């Protein structure tokens, strides 16, 4: 990034405190603004101090399918005593460096998120691989099936035997 030491903030800004620059292949938008709610730059009527100045740098990169990654950096310069903030030509470079660091962190987080959600195998639940529909039995939790035994004749209420075998009553 080319910082011009002859300019108060290190780069040419417009009347609204905006500038555009290119860094590491990104078009970065810079904004220099005070934090007051007033359009008049002057000391606060209650505290008697000037407002801090924020230098923000932001850029976005878009990809296929509407994917968007952002990088944002902000540096705040506080006034000293009752004096207004003095322009710092290194502040823009610090804000841009913070935006590039933020972008790299967001890209790494996006890669980690995408690694968790791989290509779906077709059932639409978003997971790969799908849970095994026929898991192996667990010997500790799955009990052995009870083998079927031949039914034995039982005595009925009238003293007669009931069962599945041939009729043996006399």
Image (spheres, rainbow, N blue to C red):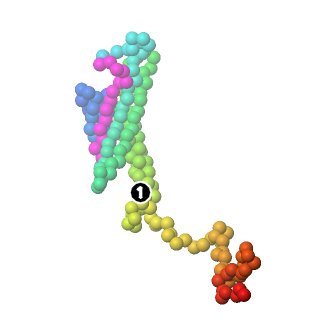
Q: Is residue 159 left or right of residue 57?
A: right
Q: Nearer the viewer, residue 139 or 43?
A: 139
Chief secondary structure of the magenta portion: strand
**Secondary structure of residue under mark 1:** helix
Q: Position of residue 144 (x, y in %)?
A: 66, 75
Bounds of the magenta segment: 26-39
Residue 81: image location, x then y, percent: 45, 17
Q: Was residue 53 drawn as part of the magenta stretch in this picture?
A: no
Residue 165 showing in the rendered view: yes
Residue 98 lies, with reference to residue 118, above or below; the image says: above
**Quadrant of the snapshot with the N terminus:** top left
Image quadrant in which you'd find residue 137: bottom right
Viewport quadrant of the C terminus = bottom right
Q: Residue at x 27, y 35 (%)?
A: 19
- Please tell me whether residue 32 belongs to the stretch shown in magenta: yes
Near-viewer residue (73 or 65): 65
Q: Is disc 1 surrounded by few (<14), some (14 to 19) or many (20+) residues within 10 Å?
A: few
**Residue at the extreme right:** 159
Q: Residue at label 1? A: 114
* Farthest left residue in view: 15
Which residue sits at x=40%, y=65%?
123
Residue 48 location, x and y as percent?
42, 12
Residue 6 placement: quadrant:
top left
As drawn, 145 above or below 33: below
Task: Tell me what residue is drawn at x 41 percent, y 60 percent.
Answer: 126
Q: Is residue 115 visible?
A: no
Q: Is 119 situated above or below 166?
A: above
Residue 110 picture location, percent across and down: 41, 52
- Point 41% across, 29% down: residue: 76
């Amino acid at each position: 990034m080319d910082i011009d030491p002859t300019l108060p903030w290190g780069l040419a800004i417009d009347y609204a405190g905006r500038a555009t620059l290119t860094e590491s292949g990104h078009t970065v938008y810079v904004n220099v603004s005070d934090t007051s709610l007033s359009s008049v730059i002057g000391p606060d009527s209650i505290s008697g101090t000037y407002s801090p100045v924020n230098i923000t740098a932001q850029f976005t990169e878009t990809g296929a399918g509407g994917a968007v990654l952002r990088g944002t950096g902000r540096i705040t310069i506080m006034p000293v005593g009752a004096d207004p903030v003095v322009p710092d030509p290194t502040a823009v470079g610090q804000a841009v460096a913070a935006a590039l660091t933020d972008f790299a962190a967001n890209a790494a987080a996006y890669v980690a998120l995408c690694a968790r959600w791989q290509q779906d195998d077709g059932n639409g639940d978003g997971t790969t691989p799908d849970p095994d529909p026929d898991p192996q039995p667990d010997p500790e939790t799955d009990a052995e099936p009870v083998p079927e035994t031949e039914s034995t004749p039982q005595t009925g209420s009238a003293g007669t035997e009931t069962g599945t075998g041939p009729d043996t009553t006399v």
